Amino acid sequence: MTDYDKAKWFQLYRHAMLELEHALMAGRIMDARSEILRRLEMLRDMPGLHEPERQAIQDALSGLRSIEREEVRHADEKRREAAKLALGRLRSIGPTIERLNASDVPDQS
């Protein structure tokens, strides 16, 4: 265990990485990133060596970018699925619409 394992930024990062519900993911990522940036500001003004924590922060930011990319892929897939479903529904009612349109045309005889 390291000194920063109990730090707020690390806890928020861990919550983001462990979040399974896509609806909550973006908020978790944003919270973790905000706290990490706050911590980096603090480290800049603190004397002493904090290289292990700085490296852990860089690793955490990399991890957050990875799950953000996965979230984008997931959202794109959901949009494709919704579009495919809508297209299938439109195609299924197409013949009915054509029949209705044909019945509206007056008899030319």
Image (spheres, rainbow, N blue to C red):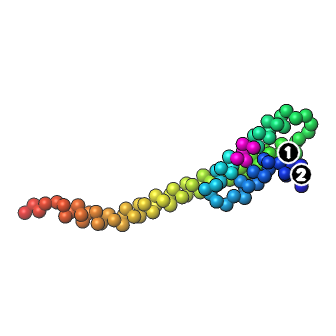
33 magenta-colored: yes
The quadrant in which residue 107 appears is bottom left
Among the two numbered marks 1 and 2 on one chain, the one whose residue lies closer to the N terminus: 2
Q: Is residue 65 visible?
A: no
At a point 64% along the width and 55% down the height, the residue shown is: 24
Residue 23 lies, with reference to residue 43, above or below; the image says below
Q: Which residue is mark 2?
A: 2
Residue 47 appears left or right of 77:
right
**Residue drawn at the location 29% of the way across and 66% of the way down:** 96
* Amino acid type, callout 2: Thr
Q: Are marks 1 and 2 in contact (CB under 8 Å)?
A: yes
Question: Residue at 24% across / 63% down in the picture?
Answer: 100
Is residue 85 something one can see in this rendering?
A: yes
Binning the other alpha carbons within 10 Å of mark 1 as few (below 14), some (14 to 19) or many (20 upward) gives some
Q: In the drawing, does residue 89 fall left or right of residue 63?
A: left
* Residue 91 lies in the magenta-colored region: no
Query: For the view shown, which residue lies furthest in the left direction?
Result: 109
Instruction: Where is residue 81? Give x, y as percent.
Output: 50, 61
Residue 19 tag number: none
Q: x%, y% of residue 10?
A: 79, 50
Magenta stretch, main secondary structure, is helix
Q: Position of residue 78 (x, y in %)?
A: 54, 58
Q: Which residue is mark 1?
A: 53
Kindly identify the amino acid type of the residue bearing the numbered disc 1: Glu
Dividing the image into 4 quarters, which one contains the C terminus? bottom left
Magenta range: 31-35
